[in-house]
Image (spheres, rainbow, N blue to C red):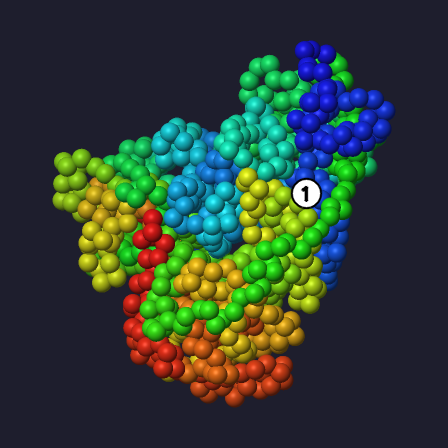
């Protein structure tokens, strides 16, 4: 072997492996690993690739259901939508690289999630993202926001996959660790699903796509540790994206998968060639042998270590039927892509790598892919909770002018229009986008059918910070509510669980609680988790982010003509509230934006009530009874009503309502964020039918007012021209930039 | 009528254009791979939007070297109809089938949104279904739509009535505020002097179906279909 470093204790530690982990490796191999093997083991056993701290907790998530074709464990989840079609989707985080190099970090995040989808044979048709930045006035926020949004746009737009929705939040807890969670959904014919499996010893292993370079080595390891002052030195571990090559790869792969040559296929994401080869072999119970001299390289002199750990983007690994090499190669050459037969499937279960005739790696594939250590880390309730729970409303002075408070809230970065962001994304390409960004959920049509798909992504991390269990539950409840408001029946979720350092007991407690809440809600809504990822170590100098269990949910609209939007349509329509005002102020945007407090218990959510409200709303939409539906979330009913007035693409409407809550303060009634509330508008003649549905479902219903005029009037608390409210909302983000 | 939709590496509105002519307007349509050096007989070619060759170097700059472009040029000289949308427009500029160049948007950002166009000419095969002064709502989605051309050519474009669309407000007034990208004189689309080649930045294929909430793009396709029959 050439001059490779000797494997010492120090080197093992530098690779992020503990002594116990190293002992386990020696026991399995029956020898010391060499340098290349150490690199491979360290990356496959990193938190990012192995889920070693989270596995135990994720086991309890519901993953099965009537329409579920593929749950977690593959590149993405798959759900049956009828007509011989299925949807394939997944969400992934790219937090660490995006903080270090926002444009490329975010861009390659998009590239990675797109590959996860088309590697299963699906054509990607829509993307979402969930972004979290530090406080708006933090010196790095503008730079990071600009870079991340441009990176997502640069990659997604070039790929021709519309970014149809998403969310952007700002909170000081993300000052040192931003979150970039990206989601893509693809469409597939049910009988044409591909998996990452290396069946059939003797079948050739084919490498296609960009050449392998020295970029991104140990990216997965970087994502498995905290940040400190020196984190910007990690910039070389961030990969550089080439969306044009990925677009060619997409079209070429779909063309190859339209033939019957392909046995299995997997993209090279984190841990590149290593991860794709050992996972494909492990799933199939086979081995893979690769000859590194056949790997297309960007530069001379790359070592086996570098070749196996590079995270160069836009690469795929295929196993094809023996004898079909030429046909497959020709298709990739038509698209001007590098393609090379790099190895073959074996029957001995080993990942074997050969360099210049010498075997440099020989490790059982299963050990790498499946048998990482599993930790049940200690957990403990964080101390901050005893402080935040002590919140009392009595210390909050009630504002004299609620109208001015509403204007301020509408212009605050977490509530204001996100048009500045989504205008930079092509959200219309593929001509399927029926509801553009800016309503509760995005809606795309499925060409060739009457169907539509609704998609949304949601998490209120302030709730999760104040009560991780409720926070997890509400992320699911609100996603579901968003979909229902668009006329869809929720089908399934994918999640990104973003947390701090799992080696700290209070972080592990947050993680445990959040996943329990998420799990409980998913069971009740019958929306299994079909995939996702866990991102730990979102910490800088010991400061962790708020627990952020982001949920992306997908629903089915059986008749696209009956989709729904959030804005009022006609003067004279009745305005109805489904649900109850409970006036809960804890954890609200009002407390944070107006009073600078992140305290109190977040709003409760009674799942029975939530389900009843959603059932009533969905039935009413399907019966064609209502004209609009909008859920109440951040900013409470006042913000929701205002959005109903002005968020539509056509002219604004005014509204005059009178709402009630048991003797509660004005700010509680207006800005409290009680869950399970939907505002609908409808023709007066339809009111009787709506009441019948509500009674049958036992849903609280109150007629609160009427659409009309050009002012928003709520009780004697708010009376404000809609144009003024709209102005504050439309310019909130842009003016701060 | 028979449409050919040219597919460059990196085209991404090719499927959308094909869908519209084939399924919405029920015309014959085929994809044409950019490496082809022979063109079958078509009545109208569409150069779709997207990022041909990743927009590397400059949008459209490498696309002009694709083998098919020689045939496209010949097709144009023979009077065939050519519609270049967004990146397709940029390719037409780079190939000198239309005059001028595109610069980055004034905001230096990608812009995707609905806006309004004033129809400036109705005696072309692409706009004969409309009337001068019509206001059309259409989306744009581009980074490089800031149209520029030298004064002399601009003068010619005006004199020869080659400017077919200008960005305007919802009343049809061509104002600075209504200009999304800084394009000279709010130019959104131009044709050649012979009037058989149209290049436009907005996307008519994205607004030709009621389910998408806007059908103003139909005017372009219906005009082509009306006028195209029997042209060649």
Image position, residue B114 (x, y; %):
35, 56
Q: Secondary structure at mark 1?
A: loop
* Residue A532 is at least partly visible in this image: no
Please give the name of the residue rendered at 44% of the width and 30% of the height, measured from the top-left corner.
Answer: B37
* Residue A722 is at least partly visible in this image: yes
Image position, residue B47 (x, y; %):
39, 42
Please give the name of the residue rendered at 73% of the width and 62% of the height, measured from the top-left corner.
Answer: A66
Note whether B190 is above or below A203 in the view shown.
below
Q: Quadrant of the N terminus of chain A?
A: top right
Whether residue A209 sits left or right of residue A146 in the image: it is: right
Quarter-wise, where is residue A280 in the image? top right
Image position, residue A306 (x, y; %):
63, 22
Chain letter of mark 1 equals A
Please give the name of the residue rendered at 56% of the width and 68% of the height, measured from the top-left corner.
Answer: A603
Quarter-wise, where is residue A139 in the image? top left
Image position, residue B84 (x, y; %):
35, 43
For the image, the number of numbered tags is 1
Whether residue B160 sits left or right of residue A545 in the image: it is: left
Whether residue A512 sits left or right of residue A159 in the image: it is: right
Note whether B137 is above or below A654 in the view shown.
above
Query: Quick one: which residue is furthest to the top in this view?
Result: A2
Residue beneath label 1, please? A503
Q: Nearer the viewer, residue A675 or B194?
A: A675
Q: Nearer the viewer, residue B156 or B167?
A: B167
Note whether B181 is above or below A486 in the view shown.
above
Q: Nearer the viewer, residue A136 or A391?
A: A391
Q: Residues within 10 Å of mark 1 (few under 14, many from 20)?
A: some
């Amino acid at each position: 072997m050439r001059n490779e470093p000797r494997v010492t204790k120090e080197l093992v530690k530098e690779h992020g492996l503990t002594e116990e982990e190293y002992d386990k490796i020696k026991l399995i191999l029956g020898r010391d690993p060499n340098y290349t093997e150490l690199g491979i083991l360290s990356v496959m056993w990193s938190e990012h690739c192995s889920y070693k701290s989270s596995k135990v907790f994720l086991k309890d998530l519901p993953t099965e259901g009537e329409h579920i074709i593929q749950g977690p464990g593959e590149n993405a989840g798959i759900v049956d939508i009828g007509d011989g079609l299925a949807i394939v989707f997944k969400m992934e985080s790219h937090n660490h690289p995006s903080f270090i190099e926002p444009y490329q970090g975010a861009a390659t995040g998009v590239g990675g999630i797109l590959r996860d989808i088309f590697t299963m044979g699906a054509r990607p048709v829509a993307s979402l993202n969930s972004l979290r930045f530090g406080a708006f006035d933090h010196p790095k926020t503008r730079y990071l926001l600009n870079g991340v949004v441009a990176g997502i746009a640069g990659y997604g737009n070039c790929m021709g996959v519309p970014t149809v929705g998403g969310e952007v939040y700002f909170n000081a807890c993300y000052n040192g660790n931003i979150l970039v969670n990206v989601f893509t959904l693809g469409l597939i014919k049910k009988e044409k699903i591909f998996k990452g499996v290396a069946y059939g010893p003797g079948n050739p292993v084919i490498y296609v796509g960009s050449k392998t370079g020295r970029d991104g080595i140990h990216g997965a390891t970087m994502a498995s540790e905290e940040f400190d002052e020196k984190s910007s030195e990690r910039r070389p571990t961030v990969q550089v994206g080439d969306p044009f090559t990925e677009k060619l790869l997409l079209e070429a792969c779909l063309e190859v998968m339209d033939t019957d040559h392909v046995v299995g296929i997997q993209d090279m994401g984190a841990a590149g060639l290593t991860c794709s080869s050992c996972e494909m072999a492990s799933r199939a119970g086979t081995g893979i042998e690769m000859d590194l001299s056949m790997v297309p390289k960007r530069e001379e002199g790359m070592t086996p270590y570098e070749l196996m750990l590079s995270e160069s983007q836009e690469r795929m690994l295929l196993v094809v039927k023996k004898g079909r090499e030429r046909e497959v190669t020709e298709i990739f050459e038509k698209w001007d892509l590098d393609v090379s037969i790099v190895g073959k499937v074996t029957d001995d279960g080993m990942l074997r790598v050969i360099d210049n005739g010498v075997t440099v790696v020989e490790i059982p594939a299963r050990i790498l892919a499946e048998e990482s250590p599993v930790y049940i880390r200690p957990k403990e309730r964080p101390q901050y909770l005893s402080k935040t729970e002590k919140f009392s409303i009595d210390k909050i002075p009630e504002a004299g002018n609620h109208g001015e408070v509403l204007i301020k809230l509408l212009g605050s970065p977490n509530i204001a229009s996100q048009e500045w962001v989504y205008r930079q994304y092509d959200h219309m390409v593929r001509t399927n986008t029926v509801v553009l960004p800016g309503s509760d959920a995005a809606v795309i049509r499925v060409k060739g059918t009457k169907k539509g798909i609704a998609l949304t992504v949601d998490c209120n991390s302030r709730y999760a910070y104040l009560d991780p269990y409720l926070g997890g539950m509400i992320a699911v409840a609100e996603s579901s509510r968003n979909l229902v408001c668009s006329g869809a029946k929720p089908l399934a979720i994918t999640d990104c669980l973003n947390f701090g350092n799992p080696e700290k007991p209070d972080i592990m407690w947050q993680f445990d609680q959040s996943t329990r809440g998420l799990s409980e809600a998913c069971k009740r809504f019958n929306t299994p988790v079909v995939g996702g990822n866990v991102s730990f170590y979102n910490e800088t100098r010991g400061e962790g982010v708020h627990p952020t269990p982001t949920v992306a949910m997908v629903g089915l609209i059986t008749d696209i003509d009956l989709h729904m939007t959030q804005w009022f349509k006609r003067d004279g329509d009745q305005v109805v509230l489904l649900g109850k005002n409970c006036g809960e102020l804890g954890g609200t945007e009002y407390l944070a934006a107006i009073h600078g407090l992140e305290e109190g218990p977040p709003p409760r959510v009674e799942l029975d009530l939530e389900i009843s409200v959603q059932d009533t709303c969905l039935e009413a939409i399907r019966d064609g009874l209502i004209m609009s539906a909008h859920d109440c979330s951040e900013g409470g009913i006042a913000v929701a009503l205002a959005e109903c007035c002005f968020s539509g693409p056509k002219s604004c409407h005014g509204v005059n309502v009178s709402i009630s809550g048991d003797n509660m303060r004005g700010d509680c009634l207006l800005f409290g964020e009680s869950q399970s509330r939907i505002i609908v508008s409808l023709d007066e003649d339809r009111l009787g039918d709506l009441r019948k549905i509500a009674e049958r479902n036992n849903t609280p219903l109150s007629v609160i007012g009427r659409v009309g005029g050009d002012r928003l009037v709520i009780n004697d608390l708010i009376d404000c021209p809609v144009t003024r409210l709209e102005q504050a909302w439309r310019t909130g983000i842009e003016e701060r930039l | 009528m028979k449409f050919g939709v040219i597919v460059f590496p990196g085209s991404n509105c090719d499927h959308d254009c094909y869908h519209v002519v084939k399924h919405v307007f029920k015309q014959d349509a085929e994809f044409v791979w950019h490496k082809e050096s022979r063109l079958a007989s078509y009545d109208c070619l569409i150069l779709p939007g997207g990022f041909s060759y990743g927009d590397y170097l400059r949008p459209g700059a490498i696309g002009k070297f694709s083998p098919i472009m020689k045939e496209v040029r010949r097709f144009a000289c023979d009077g065939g109809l050519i519609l270049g949308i967004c990146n397709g427009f940029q390719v037409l500029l780079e190939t000198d089938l239309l005059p001028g160049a595109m610069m980055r948007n004034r905001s230096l950002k990608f812009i995707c949104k609905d806006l309004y166009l004033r129809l400036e000419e109705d005696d072309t095969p692409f706009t004969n279904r409309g009337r001068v002064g019509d206001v059309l709502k259409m989306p744009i989605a581009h980074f490089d739509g800031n149209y520029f051309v030298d004064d002399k050519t601009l003068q010619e474009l005006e004199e020869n009535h080659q400017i077919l669309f200008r960005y305007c407000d919802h009343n049809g007034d061509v104002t600075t505020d209504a200009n999304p990208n800084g394009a000279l004189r709010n130019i959104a689309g131009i044709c050649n002097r012979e009037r058989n080649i149209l290049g436009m930045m907005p996307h008519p294929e994205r607004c030709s179906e009621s389910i998408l909430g806007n059908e103003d793009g139909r005017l372009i396709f219906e005009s082509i279909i009306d006028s195209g029959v029997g042209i060649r």
